[in-house]
Amino acid sequence: MPVIQFDGVGHAYPTSAGGATTVLREVTVRLTEHRVGIIGGNGSGKSTFARMLNALVVPSTGRVTVDGLDTARDARAIRRRVGFCFTDPDAQIVMPTVQEDLAFSLRRHGLPKPEVARRVEAALELYGLAPYRSQPAHLLSGGQKQLLALAAVLITEPSLVVMDEPTTLLDLANARTVRDLVAGMEPQVVLVTHHLDLLDGFDRVLVFDAGRVVCDGAPVDATAHYRALVLP
Amino acid sequence: MTVLATYVPRDSPVHRLPAGVKLTGLVLAGLGTVLLGRWWQSLLLLACVAGLYGVARLTWRCLAVQLRAVALLVAAIGVLQIVVAGWERAVVTCGNLLALVALAALVSLTTRTDDLIEVVVRGSGPLRRFGVEPERVGLLVSLGIRSVPVVARLAGEVRDAQLARGAATRPVAFLVPLVVRSLRHADRVGEALIARGVDD
Amino acid sequence: MTESTDAAARSVTNTTTAIRPRSIALVAVFAALIAVAAIVPGIPVGSVGVPITLQTLAVMLTGLCLGPLRGGLAVLLYLVIGFVGFPVFSKGQSGLGVLAGPSAGYLVAFLLAAVVVGFAATRVVRRRPAVWAPLFFVAAMLTSIVFVHGLGVLGMVLNADLSLANAFKADLVFYPGDVIKNLVAASAAAAVHRAFPDLLARRPR
């Protein structure tokens, strides 16, 4: 289980107006649990927090280390171990057909072509995408696209998977499918979500508000705190 | 990847020729037509190209379809040439034009999209000294192809939003939201590429 | 999010000179935009409802928005996608046949036009926003006349064996539509740059 360490992390970026917007303030946290949830209102900093886990964003103050690697220095190495699942699957699928996209994930692994084909086939079977292997990705349903995106992440066997609101664009049935998939996944998962029922069975949930962690604990407590925060 | 493309699979010598060879042949043929000035030379060329369609096991109908797009234009040119320069010039011009269009179409019909892309990628190898990475060229082509249905979807969404507002279709009012959505999509794609290991 | 990612990009040592992911995404998406514009039937304009084809419009818009390097690459990518067999040229054409046809000159012209108008755009956006639209229009119109019409005529002379005078006359019919398209492209590009002030701000890769 890779240890995620945030030390005095803050993040602000300059605005075109000339000032700066602060997104995160003084976040110090150590994540070692298998299933970690991140919740918070819009603009609370949770998406930026998630993006710091694979060095997509490097903090303007403080330090983030994942599995001993500093995100400011070892971004490439970190991204080889950390997979990221975004909200919009259309943006993540970069190849025209299903199997090409899965193969794309393995391009840096130095595997011979037959081995790539074998792993792609296995992934296709595992996520129920086998009938669509040669199909153009745009013909898949929204739920299938997100499954493909997730499969493309998992086929690289990451030790940590970060997910940023993966079910927001999905209907209930597909959201449930993703939830069940997450429940059975081997790697560590840090999941940012608005759908609180995704967090059942999670080990730890952090609540963000205005760039800070305002609650940190069991899902039940955290979601109660979040509801109190957000609802009148 | 061949769902929308021109390629027609057949078992023929033309199909089996490497893509690079066919492309080179096409370029040479294109340059060579400059040398053809007599009416019988043009018609001979046309007959040869038609013959190649046969070798490629493609039907007459196939050849006709390829020429249909330029038929009207070529006819107009032919008429103009007869008036301005006489019938032989007309035959030569139209014959060469049709032959080249048909030959180029033949290359497209007998060559897999993937193989053509492979040629583009390998062709960009020598450009490495200018900072061009063939691997990224391949990614660029694939991502471009992949993005066409996505942008089409965005265009549909903008149009639906306009119709829902009862707004008339004004070009600027359609294009700006479309470009804005496309830019935001490109932002997300850029993020996803980095996350999937395309180094920044 | 863009600004954060850019900040991250700047802080990580960049040892490669290859095209960056954000540029790859922009080039690909705009190539797709040109393709979509070329495939859809023209939108009816005005009370009479005359349809204008969007292909040239999309090319100008691409150059104006992305600048010479990324804009040029986007048009080049669009051409490559068409050449390898996808039906993204006007009237659903594809493949190399179009290069041999009479409209070949226009296709090559698109590439040059995007680069030139893109270069002009990088200069224009340094001035105050109020002048963007009119200056974009001037740049687009000049580029259109010199390159699109210029090379279109040349293509007809070479491929269709027309005399210069006849090719020129054949080309005249496209001018009124072009004025409208360039007005639209200039207007739209100005609005896009107001919404995304960073688009042409840095040296792209």
Image (spheres, rainbow, N blue to C red):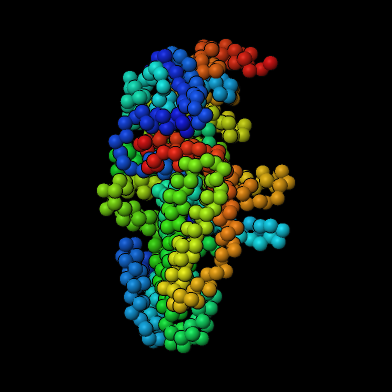
Question: At 67% from the left edge and 51% from the top edge, which residue is drawn?
Answer: B169
Residue A137 in the image: state x and y as whole percent: 50, 46
- In front of the other: B46 or A180: B46
Question: At 64% from the left edge and 61% from the top edge, which residue is drawn?
Answer: C51
Residue C54 in the image: state x and y as whole percent: 56, 57
Question: At 49% from the left edge and 27% from the top edge, which residue is drawn?
Answer: A18
Residue A84 in the image: state x and y as whole percent: 44, 31
- In front of the other: C102 or C60: C60
Query: Measured along the vertical axis of the image, is residue A79 above or below residue B62?
Result: above
Q: Quadrant of the C terminus of chain C?
A: top left
Q: How many marks?
A: 0
Query: Measured along the vertical axis of the image, is residue C189 above or below residue A55?
Result: below
**Residue A145 is at least partly visible in this image:** no
Residue C44 in the image: state x and y as whole percent: 66, 58
- Is A44 on the left or on the right of C66, as rendered? right
Query: Measured along the vertical axis of the image, is residue A216 above or below residue C146?
Result: above
Question: At 46% from the left edge and 86% from the top edge, which residue is drawn?
Answer: B85
- In front of the other: B65 or A151: B65
Which of the 4 image quadrants contains residue B105?
bottom left
**Residue C123 is at least partly visible in this image:** yes
